[in-house]
Image (tube, rainbow, N blue to C red):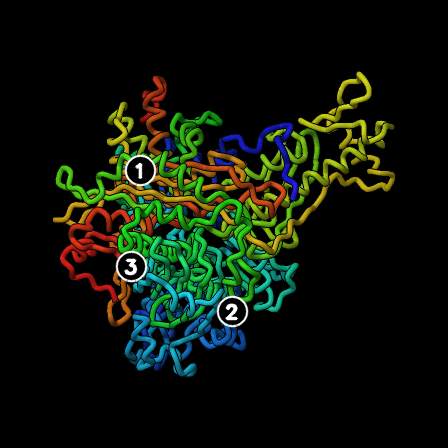
Amino acid sequence: MIKVTVNGRTYERLVEVRMTLADFLRQELDLTGTHLGCEHGVCGACTILVSGEAVRSCIMLAVQADGAELLTVESLAEGDELHPLQRAFQDQHALQCGFCTPGFLMTACALLRDNPAPTRAEVREAISGNICRCTGYQPIINAILQVSSEPEGKTKGE
Amino acid sequence: MEHIGKTTQGYVGTPIKRREDIRFITGRATYVDDIKLTGMLHAAILRSPRAHARIRSIDASKAVALPGVIKIFTYADLGDLAAVPVPIRMVQLPGLERYLQPLLAQKQVRYVGEPVALAIAESRYLAEDALDAIEIDYEDLPAVVDVYDALRDEVLVHEGAGTNLAAVHEFSIGDVDRAFRDAEYTRREEFRVHRFTGNPLETRGFVASFDRGKGELTVWGVAKLPHLNRQTIAAFLKLPERRVHFIENDVGGGFGIRGELYPEDFLIPFAAVKLGQPVKWIEDRREHLMAANHSRENRCELEVAARKDGTLLAFRAIVYGDMGAYVRTHGGLVPCSTAALLTGPYRVPNYHAKIHLVVTNKTGLGTFRAPGRYESCFYRERMLDLMAKDLGIDPVDLRFKNLIRPEEIPYEVGVTRPGSNATVLDSGNYPSALKRGLDEFGYEDLKPLQGRLENGRYHGTGIACFVKNTGGLEPYEGARIVIGDRNDVAVYLSISMLGQGHETGMAQICADALGVPMDWITVYHGNTDITPFGWGTFASRGTVMCGSAVHLAGQKLKQKLLRVAAEQLGVDAAVLEFHEGKIYRTNTEAPPVDLHEIAAKARHCGTLNQGFPELEETAYFHSSQMTYSYGVHLAHVAVDVETGMMEVLKYLVVEDVGRCINPLLVHGQTVGSAVQGIGGTMLEELIYDENGQLLTGSLMDYLLPTSTDVPDIGSVILEEAPSPLNPLGVKGAGEGGIVGTGAALANALSHALSDFGVSVKALPLTPDRIRALIAGRARQR
């Protein structure tokens, strides 16, 4: 039995020891915004925040998250009000197929929390663990920089 | 064909933000793995770990006995369906039918990754456990992994066929022998392009569900070619097509590889019908790398004949396509496409090509973004640089000299595709695009850096000109537009969407053609229930073919609407105008009438005195000819000769797309495909050892480009030459960004390292290969 808080809601579930955290979120909690692109910790599509740290939920077991606070892409918008990063991704055409997008958004959240005014090179470095096959990264970098240059955007990176 | 002029509403041509984005950025999109059905079972596929072996026996008894395991299907369980192979659907050259892939291997496996058994269990975890418990006794056979080795026929991939040479296709334009006999200059080179593939971030997958009561099958997760795939699967399962529903959902990228028919496309629906329960199969990345189509790999022996002044006279090309173990849906398309546009945007009056399709013990070959065109652009543009050096001509001058001039267009190249009409370059100003590229890139300023050592690295700049066929290929696409309740217009497309942005681009086209605000429009796609006929989204044909259909349907519907409004208002249709959703009476001061008033009355009382409520129209756009986008790639690189690391400092793509529907989307396509091409050229390779084992079976070995591997890409979209072949004047924009990447980078690297005698003739350009080139140890067979 594990107890986790996901996007502010607490769940208690009996899980098999071998179930990955990503499968737990997707299959047990129906939070399908977290995607699986490689299932071996390279592509970053499954990135979520575990107690504030950006982690790959495909190479972490659900049981390892016992007691943790998790944030997934579903946590970003408040009702119909988009998170500044979400708005910026649309503004900059930072997604095409959208499969990698949740992972990039969560990685960017962690980046802007730790470094609210990153340089272009720092953004490039920070997202280098996430793979996007469609956009060529340029618009994703532009989107993150759009948020960091908006005064109200900085506060909402947590 | 008459083009639409400046539209009254002006949505077309405007960089409108994508409306579909909201569901993707909020995590509310529905990809196939997000579907969960009551009673759903999970599939896993046992794949051959051997490249070439006989199967002595398969014993699934232990697997079936495991808890949660429902069924193991092997060849024997397919019954008479076991004889059905994956069909060839394009470029079906005689002889290829001997190399088709069975759905499950029976007595022999021919590549690592070949499906041998299908396990169905209550979860994916349990299904994968079951695979471990299936016992197969293999007897290894020698494997052959290189085309030249395969051509010796010492090891036969398909014994029954008696040869590894699956087919040969040959064509000739002009008098090539004479051109070579009379030429002042000739040169012959052997080139090679490596094996790599699209790797969409979402792997393949399906959910299939069979309603036994109604006898209806629904398959989610189909992409690219829903109608054609449905036709094949319906026939396979002996179901009427109308009882099979193919739905694509949201799709995590295509790039040629996804949406073709593979054994799994047959096996998962088959299992759902057999078991009467929904079945889900989601491919993992390792499976994707070893089982989904590989692409590109071929070799080309290219000869050029020219005058001393650099005027091209003839090309002679011998292409060897490495097809892998089975010829899949694309038939001979990839190697044949390599030859088809090898002469590119240049005037080459004499051209002979001979294409060999060779089978090896590797994964089957299919398309990847700009199939064959990336390869041929590399071969041709490298040859031009070599020739420029030989003749003491500037590479840019050589290109200007030979580019087809605008007044020569339309330019008929000749018949270069098997079973197809002549290749006709429909419209363009090629020298203008090259000039624009040189200016925008600052080529003249960079030229002095060629081969120079600066800050510890050698610099080089490379150019590659291209043309790329877009549209056409299959003869039509359709669209249906329906006016619904207040301020609601639905557009149903016959094609699918794999990330391109049709829900925005097609709405722009519809809004302008029909005359309604864009935010009234919802676009539906990728569902065989919403349009009865259609082909699909490939070969940069979505906007050319289906966009044109949307335009035609919008115009038709506008005409109908005006007739209906005229009847309701009791006026002549000629005095009515319709735009921004309102009907204006040009002969009176009366206020405009809202569309919904006309539509509501039509719905209640019928239209045109016939009692039919429909305010809808369907249109198909037909075209057997292809449009040709064109342009130039320019690359500036710096190379560290100690480590072999090449950095791309600057990259520019100039492409004329005829007419740009949405600049945001077109630039997105260009930049994204350029990065795919740069990654494919500098990082990626599907490497096999001599036993046919895939050495790059994970993303830790097969390196996809990340944000720190590539620079910002420059993208210039031109609209100088609208296509005369469709009402919008558009050309496809999905592939121009990738087509010249191999060529431009290879030329740039060769210039950078010319003092070391480096002349690139083989891809990829990974650090180890660059070091080997510098050391003169490059294996360039």
Q: Position of residue B125 (x, y in %)?
A: 36, 57
Point out the frontmost of discs 2 and 3: 2
Which chain is mark 1 on? B
Question: How many numbered discs?
Answer: 3
Which chain is mark 2 on? B
Q: Calculate the distance from the C-alpha at mark 3 to the C-alpha at mark 1.
A: 40 Å
Q: Calculate the distance from the C-alpha at mark 2 to the C-alpha at mark 3.
A: 30 Å
Provide the secondary structure element on which disc 1 rests: helix
Please state, as top left, top right, bottom left or bottom right, where the C terminus of chain B lies in the image. bottom left
Q: Position of residue B419 (x, y in %)?
A: 55, 66
Residue for point 37% across, 59% down: B306
Provide the secondary structure element on which disc 3 rests: loop
Is residue A116 rendered to the left or right of residue B577? left
Q: Which of marks 1 and 3 precedes in the sequence?
A: 1
Q: Taking the image as drawn, is residue A19 in sight?
A: no
Q: Is the residue under label 3 in contact with that under label 2 (CB below 8 Å)?
A: no
Q: Which of marks 3 and 2 precedes in the sequence?
A: 2
Residue in the foreground of this view, choosing between B694 and A30: B694
Q: Which residue is mark 1?
A: B443
Three-letter amino acid code of the residue under disc 1: Tyr
Three-letter amino acid code of the residue under disc 2: Gln
Residue for point 67% across, 42% down: B552
- The picture quadrant where one finds residue B654 is top left
Three-letter amino acid code of the residue under disc 3: Gly
Q: Position of residue B722 (x, y in %)?
A: 55, 41
Q: Which residue is mark 2?
A: B92
Point out the frontmost of discs 1 and 2: 1
Residue for point 35% across, 80% down: B156
